[in-house]
Image (cartoon, rainbow, N blue to C red):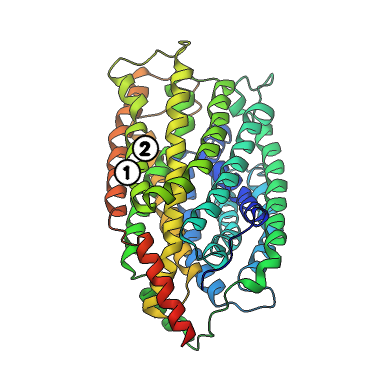
Amino acid sequence: MQRQSLGLWTKLFYGFGSVAFGVKDNGFAFFLLLYYNQVLGLPEAYVGVGILIALLVDATVDPLVGYVSDHFRSPWGRRHPFMYAAALPVAVAYYFLWSPPAFASQSGLFAYFVALAVLVRVLISFYEIPSVSLVPELTDKYDERTSILSYRYFFGWWGGLTMSVLAYVVFLTPDAAHPIGVLNPLGYRRYGLASAVLMAVAILISAIGTHPYIPRLRVPAVVQRHGLRAMAAELRQTLNNRSFLGLFGSAIFGGMAVGLTAALTLYFNTYYWELSSAQMSVLVMLNFVSAAIAFAVAPGLSVRFGKKRAAITTSVIGLVLAPLGVILRVCGIFPANGSPWLLPILAVLNTALVTFFIITSILVASMLADVVEDNEVGTGRRSEGVFFAAYAFVEKAVSGIGIFASTVLLRLIGFPHGAQPGAVDSAVVRNLGLAYTPTIMVLYAIAIACLSTYRISRATHEANLQRLGRAAAQ
């Protein structure tokens, strides 16, 4: 039977926890490569390999966390024990990632970097996977799932963006020894401390706020199968759902595109567009607008057009917008660096692109939630954790490939170490745009094609609920 609609406070408490993931994600995506490469002097190849190792380890852990949380039993339910346990450890690990001791060799710094990056990613998974798995348990409703996920993405983006703005405006500020703010090592240490505190607070507030709903969460029947072979067999059967495979394929190529874009964003803003820290902070602050628009619009698109149609449409628009600035620059019809028109045009393009990206992410996550009942009809099992963990697995793994590819690209075009804005050879800067544009367009196009194979509509979902309701009544 469908459950009562969720109240506003439930959505707020649930969504606020994603601040922790947003802070971590923004830090890894936009600052980590530049910090360890340009500030600490670790070669970009080392940083790329380190990030790739951390992502692959994390991606391997995710399905195990999802499987264990699906089968976990406690007075606090399946998910909340993991959420509570992750709060303090992930905060401590994140702080030390940005406060490395002095090492006499690059190998020592590399080992420290890999160890802390792995630890942070694994620990945040122990919160993130159980937390996102709550969505199908909190509500069966087709459109309400999009609504609650809108809160999740809203707070995730606002949390990450808030720390990014603080990083540019408060922490990564120039001083006498570091005229370029983003190259100031002390700023990264302060950023790490503030981020760690915020992450712990967000996780605990979300866990405590949703704690009263534990009695209404689903408690699947106890499964008697044991051992790694039985677990692997169950995972294979569960993940063989056709609609999930479509989302899975989309995540593979979309994740590579996201990883590549995220790793190169700061490089483009600093060296391609030659923006100052203040100008970069403007672009980041406008993402608040993007997140707010997506939060307001995504549920309505789900109601009016259905999730699949809406997600494909917003993805196509994003595909067009993503490389548009670079294409116009290559064609010679974009404002020159330093022009008063440069920042406003970049602001419009970036705000629109991020808006459509967030809307697509909300809709796809809601589509993934509907796979739970679709699979339950065929297997008799509820596997929320497995599905969300598997999706996160491929997103993270291939995102790491995308980030690693960015370091390869930087090396192939001969991007210099310790580069100063305006001092990089114009041919190198131009090649950065020429290499990035076709790569990103192909990756996003394949991701959209995979998304089109998803087959669960509103009618399909309602039929699945009815079949499960009849089965439960027998």
The image quarter containing residue 330 is top left
The three-letter code of the residue at mark 1 reads Tyr
**Residue identifier under label 1:** 444
User: Is 408 situated above or below 216?
Assistant: above
Relative depth, front residue between 308 and 415? 308
Marked residue nearer the N-terminal end (2 or 1): 2
C-alpha distance separating marks 2 and 1: 9 Å
Q: Which mark is residue 54?
A: none
Is residue 405 toward the left or the right of residue 291 in the image?
left
Q: Nearer the viewer, mark 2 or mark 1?
A: 2
Relative depth, front residue between 462 and 92? 462
Instruction: Please state the horizontal and vertical placement of residue 184, each as a whole percent of the image.
Output: 64, 29
Dot 2 falls on a residue whose secondary structure is helix
Q: Residue at x 55, y 33 (%)?
A: 289
Instruction: Please state the horizontal and vertical placement of residue 439, each as a whole percent of the image.
Output: 30, 38
The image quarter containing residue 285 is top right
User: Is 195 situated above or below 13?
Assistant: above
Q: Which mark is residue 318?
A: 2
Q: Does the residue at mark 2 contact the one at mark 1 (Cβ under 8 Å)?
A: yes
Q: Residue furthest top?
A: 339
Task: Please rate how many residues cluster around mark 1, counting C-alpha atoms within 10 Å: few if below 14, some from 14 to 19, many from 20.
Answer: many
Relative depth, front residue between 373 and 85? 373
Relative depth, front residue between 190 and 15? 15
Instruction: Determine if residue 59 is in view.
Output: yes
The three-letter code of the residue at mark 2 reads Gly
